[in-house]
Image (tube, rainbow, N blue to C red):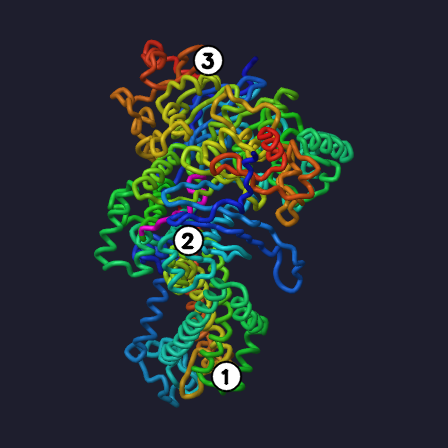
Amino acid sequence: MSVAVTTSGAAPRAVWRRGILASRKGRWGFGILTGLALIAIFAPLLAPHDPNAIDATRILAKPSLPHPFGSDDLGRDVLSRVIFAYRVSLAVAVGSTLLAFLVGVPLGLYAGYHGGWVDTAIMRPIDMVLALPAMLLAVALIAIIGPGSNISALAIAVIYMPILARVVRSSTLVVVSQTYIEAARARGTRSRRIITRHVLPNAIGPAIVQATILMGFALQIEAALSFLGLGAQPPTSSLGVMLADGRNVLTQAPWVEVFPGLAIAITVLAFNFFGDGLRSRLDPAGVTE
Amino acid sequence: MSDLLALEHVDVGFATEDGRVSAVSDVSLSVSEGEIFGLVGESGCGKTTLAMALMGLLPTTAHVAGSVRFQGLELLGLPPDELRKLRGDRISMIFQDPMTSLDPTFPVGEQVAETITAHRDVNDARAKERALELLGDVGIPEHERRFGDAPHRLSGGMRQRVVIATALANEPALVLADEPTTALDVTIQAQVLDLLRDLRTRLQTTIVLITHDLGVVAQICDRVGVMYAGQLVEVAPVSEIFRSPRHPYTQALLAALPTQQQVPGSLRVIPGRVPNLADPPPGCRFSTRCPYVMDVCATVPPLAHETDEHLIACWLSEATNQAGRPDHATAGGAA
Amino acid sequence: MSQILSSNEVAPVRPGGPILQVDALVKHFPTDRGLMASGAVVHAVDSIDLEIHPGEVLAVVGESGSGKSTLARCVLRLIDPTSGRIVFDGRDVTGMKGRQLAGFRQQVQPVFQDPFSSIDPRWRVGRSVAETLDAFSIGTKAERQERVVDLLDRVGLDPSFARRRPHELSGGQRQRVGIAAALAPEPRLIVADEPVSALDVSVQAQVLNLLADLQRDLGLAILFVAHDLAVVEHISHRTAVMYLGKIVETGPTERVFRDPRHPYTKALLEAIPHPDPERRLVGSVLEGEIPSPIAPPSGCRFRTRCPVAIDRCAVEEPEMTLFGTGHTAACHVARAELEASAG
């Protein structure tokens, strides 16, 4: 019989070494994400110029040595702007997914563990949210609360939460059917303890993989919302805001549009690679006894 | 009686992360026409792997060497297409789990008929007629009504009867039955064993029965081969295996069976564990647990004739010693 | 004079009597749930009475659908019975909750069939063994660790096993871990559901020896649920034979095996594939299939397969009849034979 072993296991270091980093995709994903995270964290140190400094002499200037990504329609340095915008976008992506994870995982866990009416009570509303088109939901939410990067993070979390809850619920159902859960109950272990000590560690793996991949796509949703003017508001800039701005000058100065787009593409790809690396570790076939 | 199936020096290895696992090592044996031959051993002894090797059903990570002759035809190295034609026709198989060996969406009668049309040039009506006959033969009550039922509507015992009917569809010369009664209740098991015995008498089908259950072996087999950790350690007529087992492993296995005569807690146990087949001990693989282990056990003991019908691979045996000497180097197994 | 006693005339429980007493236990499962439910129920366990005395091994045998595992799960309080009582050590535990239930759980521990799914694959062995001790905070941490070492030793595993993970262990070793975990809170009753049926013969012998030793040394009572009659005959003091949710025969194991009275018990014993080519079973196998527990036959549930069934069997459910000390069976035919011989 094979058993899923996940990163949250008791030997995380071994899992990293033998698992995620053993696959080439996992290594690439991990490497790129580390680099991008460092860029986001140290943005003020890395950006060569003030991202908001307007320079009338450099309007739509081509990429050059001091300004490798060129300048935009206000003469602002595109590289510096991408770095700062990336910081906002990544924060939204990570924050939203984390929020969805923290809410969705417990819900899926309780629904799957208790079953019956508890399951129905938790999952029916979640299914209803899941049935709505994601973008529509986000736009409606922002229409009610108002735009901003925090609000778009919340909107993305609302879209993601049901997905993660579903994933956790289904893996929980598998774990709960194992005899060691029944054994724990018969031994007198309390439900809460069974959930936290047995069910959660054994059921959370697929949700971690899913969340990783969703995190990449959150960047796209954030961009789409910002593109529509529903995301980050000036003076804050995000990659989506940059895409929206760059669209107007696409023919004269494609670099204004291309570099933020590339940043999104690379990040989504890196999250996907990393997720695949995690998945291969989680795949029951990958662990033989 | 002539040999229907003859295995010579069959080796099966699997390439794994931990290196090459030697699942079957140098197995030689023969099965005569019309007999029920039991291949018995505990989990991991290689009995199922051996059967899969004969059928050409092992994954590509497996490496098979040696010779398997069926009705004089060499099976190892036969093109996959030729093997496929043999399977379900002249050789068929019965698996342990009757649920997973039937297609859940298909009426059971159709599944039997399909096996016939796959190998025989007959029209559907004739195949159906024959399938119906077979369902009756294997003792399915109201088989005409049952013909159109999906597998899930049948009980486990009935499903296994359908599987047996499928296996017999083309009157095969050889049936490989892998734990055919293990998933069944004891009263149903008795019925299925009865059926297998009856079919052998009626159709003269040769059956190789693979099982861990010594009770089942005693009930229906004519001859028995005992496997341990990939090696064939003893071959004998069933009465001799139970009356005078010669190999220390066979002896230990029989002694471990619970009986009422023994005081609870006093069952004989075999100390230690089955060796890791990625790194098996040299020579006799039972040597690590054997109470009679000697220095010579580090050399593989050949399977040799103790009597005409009783073969044993153990250095305690005079026959093995004779066969093992270089001047008598005719390590053999055919009975 | 007739010696026949029906079970409800048997003398009341003597003081210091059974450690576990099951009275008229019934468990029905709905076949489907929700709005479309048909109201059909599976009669998994139907009005079962049994007792286990301290230090006794009671085997419950039966084929699939007999309800033996449902019975075990009711006794472990993993599922709630539809009706009936479970009395442990003189106290009705059927409706117990909270702290009282926790106290009961410490005294009644399970051993399960599948050694691969019955311990958490992610937990180190020591943690699994100590699960009950941790759950109830029994002793200090150091004491618990010490106890784990003792327990591993008790079941024949080296203390170093505490650090190992389940995937490094063989099936037999895992089953030992399961037994050690069950022993941790010093229970008085072990409910073992097919504890050796997933194991190879040679490993099965080791685990049976271990259970027998523990039972003797610790004076444990064991409810031993199994389908393998050879195992049951070897290890149990008393045997109860179940068929379709009912106990059809019960008595001292030797009596039940040597002198079975119920036709089902006889058929079951005859169907054993004896590991002896001289004792081949020819013909005379029980025909037919186990009927559906959703609509069990009227009267005696075995009558549809019974070789000696009479008309009365279809209309009247047979009562338990006493055939000897502690040996009862529920069969009209056997009862009539007994009455005839008693004059």
* Foreground of the two, A189 or B143: A189
Amino acid residing under circle 1? Leu
Query: Which mark, residue C88?
Result: 2
Secondary structure of residue under mark 1: loop
- Give the spatial CA distance, label 1 vs label 3: 87 Å
* Residue A23 vs residue B300, the one in the foreground: B300
The chain ID associated with circle 2 is C
Q: Look at mark 1 in the image and give the residue it sits on.
A: A230
Secondary structure type for disc 2: strand
Amino acid bearing label 3:
Glu
Is residue B325 inside the magenta stretch? no
Asked whether residue C196 is drawn in magenta, I would say yes
Dot 1 and dot 2 residues touching (CB under 8 Å): no
Q: Is disc 1 in the same subunit as disc 2? A: no
The residue marked by circle 1 belongs to what chain? A
Chain letter of disc 3?
B
Looking at the rendering, the stretch of residues picked out in magenta corresponds to: C186-197
Residue type beneath disc 2: Phe
Q: CA distance from mark 1 to mark 2?
A: 66 Å
* Position of residue A190 measured from the top left corner of the image (x, y, whole percent): 39, 62
Q: Label 3: which residue?
A: B309
Residue B6 placed where, x, y %? 50, 20
Quarter of the rendering occupied by the N terminus of chain B: top right
Above or below: residue B303 compared with residue B289: above
Looking at the rendered image, the disc whose residue lies closer to the viewer, 3 or 2, is: 2
Q: Is residue B151 visible?
A: no
Residue A159, percent across and down?
51, 73
Q: Is residue A105 visible?
A: yes
Closer to the camera in the image, A131 or C51: C51
In three-dimensional space, the C-alpha distance between marks 3 and 2, rounded to whole angstroms, equals 58 Å
Residue B116: which quarter of the image? top right
**Position of A51 relative to A264 (above/below):** below
